[in-house]
Image: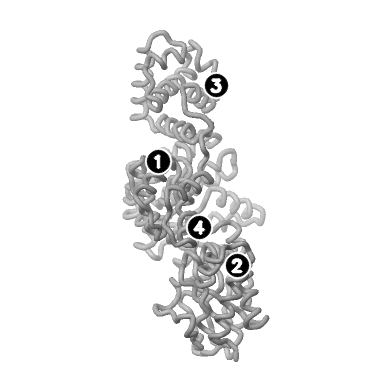
Amino acid sequence: MASIEKSEVFFEKLKSRLISLGMGEAVAHSIANQVVPVKFDGQTIIADCKSKFHASMIISAKMTDIIEVAREVWGQNVEFYVRSDADAPATTPKRSKPSNKLSETLPLFDAPDEAKKLTSKTTLKTQKSPRVANPSIEKTENPFSFSENKFESIAKISTLQASKNINQISTQMSITPINLTSEVDTRGAPPQDATRSLNPELTFTTFVRGQSNLIAYSACESIAKNPGNLTNPVFIYGATGLGKTHLLHSVGNEILRQHPTWTIKYVTSVDYMNELIQAIRFSKQEQFRNKYNHVDVLLVDDIQFLESKDSTQLEFFHTFNDLFQKKKQIVITSDKYPKDIPNIEERLKSRFLQGLIADIEPPGFEDRVAIIEAKAKALLLKLTRDVVLHIATHVKSNVREIQGILNNLAMTQSMTGAPPSIESTNAHLRRIIRVPAQSLDLNAIQKAVAAHFGIKLSELMSQDRSQRLVVPRHIAMYLSRELLGSATTEIAEAFGRKNHTTVMHAVEKVKELIEKDASTRAIINELKRKLDQNLV
């Protein structure tokens, strides 16, 4: 049934289908050439995808069309699976030499995070069936292939196909699926329970350290080596997309590497709140408390979303106290300094402040260059020095934006075979980065500061010397000097002051506060980010 000739027919038909979907002939040829049928057994066909990048970014998205083409060639009852090259044996047969031995079975999708839960518990059992060529198979070491950074549409398609394939394989090969949504009591739970909430790709090794994140990185690395004994909690704050979540997972993965039997829980504040709501709804508060009170390490992301959630804050307060007293390591992230998070109880803020506070600032130019080079290398992306510097010049505040641009450039390079140029890079930059509507000036800074502190522009410019206006006014003067390099006399005039020494005093005062007060430093960084991206 399955033959070399039919493999060639499959290649031509898949290429034609991709062209009909709007792809160019060269691109369609490249993608179709990635899907190579290599194993055949009855109604089951296994294909290798040479490129993990193609598997995660393209093949998964075209899942339905690939299956339809396969069934046109081999029959409507055929089950067709694809695995990425990373999961294939060291020597992968060429298209012209398909194997007739089914030594292992892998699915035709790169499953989203929920399906990862199957990897640690899925067991293949022997079942006498004419559809399995090698009945001696009892277990597949890594039956599923996974990739990160899915687009939402790809994840949705993959999820649908995952459900289908899992059901089909379970019937054919007696795999015992697990409940993906079930919660396991962490008391005495195996290490797999800990790893379910951690992303193994996010480690200290893959984190790009620089001056902007040095304190936070060093703190996390230190407590990962000696959890619960150095400082507790560790509170990391900074704008979105700067690596806070990466550091949380790095801590968890490093501790798990050293202590495989420990229970490590990574959770977002929103997930924590939703779990609590479900526990209350079904009268399982005791199980909920046991789950969190028996962890060895608690990693909480985006704690600021607990604002105004009084019941959740109370529960988290008790969880925090219980773990703190047991000297269990707690690491928390937020986009704001603890004192600046609105509608969070003071007793929680005081506990956040009792440990180490570390901020992550937007990366400087040198840090951005290092990040771009490191991530491009991981993507096998060939960037000239000019392109690296060009991206670093235009993407200034968000590491996620850098990752997004590099992903797009990698896809373009994969399809065209040509490394990115300045021109092609600019096309992606225009789609991802907001282009400032106007150049930065004194008036834009004044408006941004007034909006941030919730005061009127006229109040900022007034002679009123009350504390609620003096601090914003000094910060606006400092930013005018720092970002624009304006003369003190020009700044004084813009603020309706007669003496430029007022500006000099304001600038020095703010510099002192930045050095001594983390809250002021966070405000300055946030204002710089907004002004840099024209978000005011």
- Contact (Cβ within 8 Å) of mark 1 with mark 4: no
Q: Where is residue 409 in the image (x, y as percent from the top left)?
A: 46, 54
- Contact (Cβ within 8 Å) of mark 2 with mark 4: no
Residue 517, quarter of the rendered image: top left
The amino acid on which the numbered mark 4 sits, given as a three-letter code, is Asn
The amino acid on which the numbered mark 2 sits, given as a three-letter code, is Leu
Q: How crowded is mark 1: few (under 14 residues within 10 Å), some or many (20 or more)?
A: few
Q: What is the quadrant of the N terminus in the image?
A: bottom right
Which of these two is toward me, 53 or 497? 53
The answer to which of marks 3 and 1 sits earlier in the sequence is 1
Residue under label 1, please give it.
393
**Marks 1/2: CA distance?**
37 Å
Residue under label 4, please give it.
149
The amino acid on which the numbered mark 1 sits, given as a three-letter code, is Thr
SS at badge 1? helix
Residue under label 3, please give it.
455
**Marks 3/1: CA distance?**
33 Å
